[in-house]
Amino acid sequence: MYKKYINPDFKWTNFTLEEQAKVIVAPRSNNEMDASKLKAEFPELLSIKDSLVKYVFEPNRKVPAN
């Protein structure tokens, strides 16, 4: 999303798990919250990605949409 909405020329490089372990204290944890009760209570609630696009990236757009 950063490349699409902020800087289309941005280039990143991936690093190995060994390189990652040198710069962070704890190992990565990919947890997902169960939001079923929240979605049932607020069905109009946008997903995190859709919320970011609508309220962060779109209002601050610097490049035209593709």
Image (cartoon, rainbow, N blue to C red):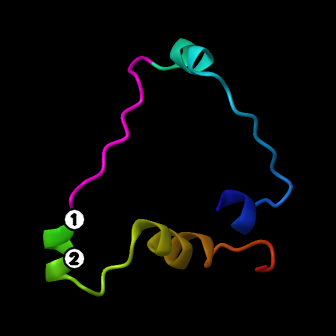
Secondary structure state at the residue bearing disc 1 = loop
Secondary structure state at the residue bearing disc 2 = helix
Decide whether residue 15 is among the magenta residues. Answer: no
Residue depicted at 36% across the width and 34% down the height: 29
In the image, 63: left or right of 16?
Answer: right
- Amino acid tagged 1: Ala
Across and down, in percent, residue 35 comes to: 22, 65
Q: Which mark is residue 39?
A: 2
Decide whether residue 33 is among the magenta residues. Answer: yes
CA–CA distance between discs 2 and 1?
Answer: 6 Å
Q: Which residues are magenta?
A: 25-35
Residue depicted at 64% across the width and 22% down the height: 16
Q: Quadrant of residue 6?
A: bottom right
Q: In the picture, which quadrant includes the N terminus?
A: bottom right
Residue position marked by numbered label 1 in the rendering:
35
Badge 2, how many Cα within 10 Å: few under 14, some, many 20+?
Answer: few
Residue depicted at 52% across the width and 15% down the height: 21
